[in-house]
Image (cartoon, coloured by chain):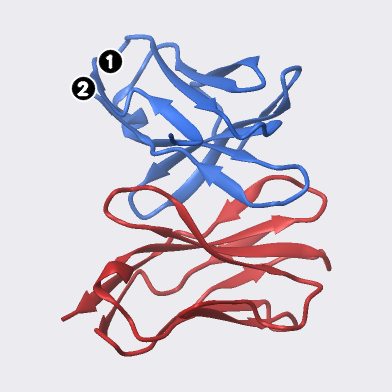
Amino acid sequence: DADVTQTPRNRITKTGKRIMLECSQTKGHDRMYWYRQDPGLGLQLIYYSFDVKDINKGEISDGYSVSRQAQAKFSLSLESAIPNQTALYFCATSDQVRDEQFFGPGTRLTVL
Amino acid sequence: AQTVTQSQPEMSVQEAETVTLSCTYDTSESDYYLFWYKQPPSRQMILVIRQEAYKQQNATENRFSVNFQKAAKSFSLKISDSQLGDAAMYFCAYRGNRDDKIIFGKGTRLHILP
């Protein structure tokens, strides 16, 4: 079973709709992250969380919100989706001891 | 602010040959970590290799090795005996010791020619 899972894997929605992307992990890591990937831009950090009570904005948090429901779950919401939020979204986790980040399989979101 | 630059948007290499992907970074910190991630067409992000800045020895993982030049702030990835399965986007990434965030370069798309 995958250590970091994301649902859905693909989603097409319309402008103005509310969308939630979910991430779950079985690695027991405290730290979780949401990234956005656009062609030619690499990965940009949206939000990150060091534990359930600690949420921090990343480089491009405008238009997004997050919820850390439990150590193992970290959700990303788009309250009112717009076309320029069409992208590939990754969830990642990291171990406080090691610095490697472990990525989920990604969610491809298309906003029409 | 730290930045990571990958100056080669695309590269091609003949199968079984060696290729080097370039990465430079900018930081004022002395202690940090550097990574190379691979993203194949499946889009999964896979860690290829990591380097701690305090270690002088270059990291090696099978056919993958790095040339870490701390003074020059350079961190290149060498892939030896290139295989078709090495075709992917490769991202260089930086993490400072005081900050848990990772900063990614824009990536280099590597094509393997049969």
- Quarter of the image where the C terminus of chain A is located: top left
Say above or below: A44 vs A14: below
Question: What mark, if any, has residue A81 been given in the picture?
Answer: none
Q: Is residue B35 left or right of residue B1?
A: left
Q: Secondary structure at mark 2?
A: loop
The colour one sees for chain B in the rendered image is red
Of labels 1 and 2, earlier in sequence is 1
Q: Secondary structure at mark 1?
A: loop
Dot 1: within a 10 Å radius of its alpha carbon, few (fewer than 14), some, or many (20 or more) residues? some
- A101 or A42: nearer the viewer: A101
Say above or below: A84 vs A100: above
* Residue B94 point in image, percent of width and height: 64, 60
* Residue B4 point in image, percent of width and height: 58, 63
* Residue in the picture at 42% in, 28% down: A6
* Residue in the picture at 63% in, 50% down: B102
* Residue in the picture at 31% in, 31% down: A86
Residue bearing mark 1 = A15
Dots 1, 2 in contact, CB < 8 A: yes
* Chain identifier for the blue-coloured part of the image: A
Residue bearing mark 2 = A112
Q: Name the amino acid, label 2.
A: Leu
* Cα–Cα span, label 1 and label 2: 6 Å
- A104 or A43: nearer the viewer: A104
Choose top left, top right, bottom left or bottom right for residue B19.
Answer: bottom left
Q: Name the amino acid, label 1.
A: Thr
